[in-house]
Amino acid sequence: MTRAAGHPPNGVLGEATAGVCPVESVDTAEGLAVVLRSLRRRAARRDGGAQLTYRELSKRTGWAHGVIGDYFAGKTLPPTDRFDVLVQLLGATGRELRELATARDRVEEARRARAAAGGRAAEPGPDGPRLRPAAPRQLPADIPGLPGRGEELAALDQLRPAPRGGGPVVVALDGPGGVGKSALAVHAAHRLGERFPDGQLYADLRGSRRDERPVPPAVVLRRFLCALGAPRPHPAGATDAAAAYRTLLTERRVLIVLDNALDAAQVRPLLPAARGCTVLVTSRGVLATLNGASHLHLTPLPPPASVAVLDLWAGPGRLAAERGAAETIARHCGHLPLALRIAGARLAARPRWPVRELADRLADPARRLAELSFADLDMHEAMAANHRELLARGATGRAAALVLPQLAARQGDLTVAQAAQATGAAPSATEAILEQLVDVQLLESRAPGRYRFHPLTRLFALCPAAAAPSPRNGTRPMPSADRAIG
């Protein structure tokens, strides 16, 4: 009987590996996947239960369950460290670990040899063949866990290079300042990275930075061309650079993260045309005019996840004895990941403080935003970026900024009629103002004609100098209406 390429022959490796396919002849990812599936079946027989599912393995490792599925299907070769963890979870013995590691390295070497034989390892140059540089790995450091983002991660875990004939996959993440867009995009990119063997590109577009201007697309393109090994000199103009960039990516599978985008116009030149590429974009506002993009709208965390985030940053066991105080801090943080991270960092920096001390400090609305500042993290500044974008939107934006404190002084939901009464403007003009505030994430609209402030955004809106940077110490004066917010 003819055996499929890469499939191990029947039999066993030896006494120590009874019930597991042999690995001596494995030289493909598909063959290695057969061994992994054999290990999983043996572990189930040994434990007298069902086989571990991809989701169960995902919970134990923190890897995307879709990526784990690719390992078991032979679509992706696990990196060395992940492969070692995986086979240990599947019950490999010490001898098996050594033999499996050798087999995994053999698969990697065979893949490189096949790529070289197919001409992919070298590219022509003016002085003869030129080796393609190593695939770029530009992602920032990962955050180990993201409590409360299970649904969003499950959706992002489905991303993979598009089938032949399709264009690139583009997902745009939006939400208010401090909601955790960048952390989610980077974490998801780390989980998905192995599906894109030709590299991961990352650029902070700085669309929300107070101290720096947004990065022009031409600058980002030149950086990407350099990372991808494009021959110099790189095109100077954005149009030519974008064309060279798209050409380079034509036959590559690359994951691209574009963080902190100002608007769709900044992003469009950075989108590849290659079907094998995927792009994750983060921005404050919804990039509704970005062609072909799917949108993921982030909101504050549920309360239990908020406490989990606080615990993650405060340090092991710090909150155990003061759970009530921790829940109070989470509520005062409005369940926003950035505010929770700041609060946790402050607790970590003051190991002798009772947790209740910070809860009491945050209880005063007049000083809450000033307290949510630590080192280079500042909740007030995160919201000030939205305010600056509002002011940049011309006459309507400036009119919205002027009436922001009046709108914030009203408690609860706002209707157009109530907002018009508060500002003295006509209903049509008032609705335009409210929609401007929604566009820059200073106001939420959960239903047509109904609007609501996030608790921390309300505090920011009531500040007399909303666009001013917050002091590191002391308090910021607040209008008397703020005292009722709590």
Image (cartoon, rainbow, N blue to C red):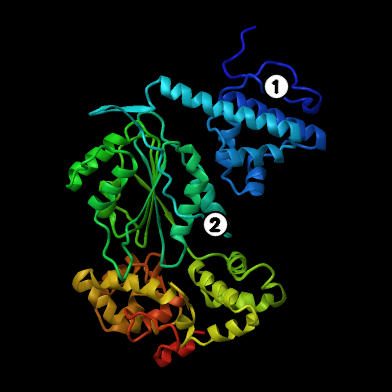
- Gap between marks 2 and 1 measured at Cα: 40 Å
**Amino acid of disc 2:** Arg
What's the amino acid at mark 1?
A: Pro
Is 130 or 229 nearer to us in this picture? Answer: 130
Residue 435 against residue 188 in the figure, above or below? below
Mark 1 nearby-residue class (10 Å; few <14, some 14–19, many ≥20)? many
Tell me the quarter of the picture where residue 451 sits: bottom left
Q: Residue 149, which numbered label?
A: 2
Q: Is residue 101 above or below residue 191?
A: above
Quarter holding the N terminus is: top right
Relative horizontal placement of residue 21, taking residue 15 as reference (left or right) = left
| Residue 273 in which image quadrant | top left
Residue 412 x, y percent position in the rendering: 46, 78
Element type where label 2 sits in the image: loop
The residue that appears at 36% across and 62% down in the rendered structure is 284
Is residue 335 shown to the viewer in this render? no
Horizontal relation, residue 404 to residue 362: left or right: left
Which is nearer the eye, 95 or 387? 95
- For disc 2, the neighbor class at 10 Å (few under 14, some 14 to 19, many from 20) is some
Of the numbered discs in the image, which one, if any, rests on residue 22? 1
Point out the tag, 2 or 1, that comes first from the N-terminus.
1
